[in-house]
Image (tube, grey):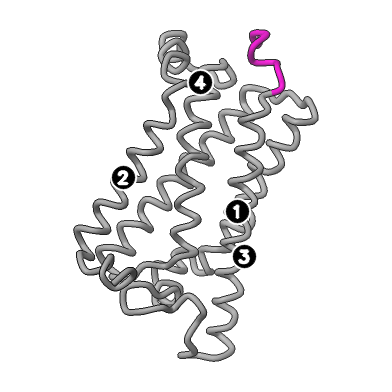
Amino acid sequence: MHSPAALKRPLAYALLLILTGLVGAYSSFVLVLDRIQLLRNPGESLGCDFNPFVSCGTVIESWQGSLFGFPNPLLGVAGFVAPVAVGVGLLAGARFARWFWALFVLGLTLAWLFVTWLFTQTVFSIGTLCPWCMLVWAVTIPLFWISLVYTAARGLTPVPRRIRRLAGAALPFTWVLVVVNYAAIVLVILAVFPRLPLVLFG
């Protein structure tokens, strides 16, 4: 059975799920619209095509932008519905089985791995940054790390007792994992694009 702490309505976590889910879904939807615009008008400049370093169009039209044969943002439009639905359910007092939480965290893990791969491809292969894509990265990172630690700490996922205790101790400091993840991305971008700050702010 779940502990009493696990059964309380987790307001902060629910709001995090809803906020990140909505931002991620909106960003993905904008990317879908941009892809449609490029299909209708090939070669047209998009509103987020600012300079050689920052260009949505270049990323969208790359093979990495349609890894599974269709535009990647469609995955985001569909996938970000899940955290919103779970967040609303938690606010309404819903309780989910452990298998549900395990699948939810698995889905978030796959999403984090996918955006991490897209980040490496964008920086090292495509050589151009996409603002809307980066916004999707920005919401996926806390969504993944906080959900991973939170569900383990609250006994919502079937993890060993030792992992649960460790997650419980780490829960107040989960933001450190998020900041470190953000910092790693920023440092890599600055290392690969050292002139980017001058182009953006110069």
Q: Residues within 10 Å of mark 3 (few under 14, many from 20)?
A: some
Instruction: Pick the quarter of the image with the N terminus.
Output: top right
> How far separated are the C-alphas under marks 4 and 2?
25 Å
Instruction: Pick the quarter of the image with the C terminus.
Output: bottom left
> How far separated are the C-alphas under marks 1 and 3?
10 Å
Q: Earlier in the sequence, mark 3 or mark 2?
A: 3
Q: Which mark is residue 29?
A: 3
Question: Residue 90, percent across and down?
Answer: 72, 30
Q: Are marks 4 and 1 in contact (CB under 8 Å)?
A: no
> How far separated are the C-alphas under marks 3 and 2?
27 Å
Check disc 2 and give the amino acid type: Ala
Q: Which residue is mark 1?
A: 23
Q: Residue at left 71%, top 22%?
A: 9
Q: Residue at left 66%, top 33%?
A: 14
Check disc 3 and give the amino acid type: Phe
Q: Are marks 4 and 2 in contact (CB under 8 Å)?
A: no
Residue 109 shown left or right of residue 52 in the figure: right
Which one is in front in this view, the residue at disc 4 or the one at disc 2? 2
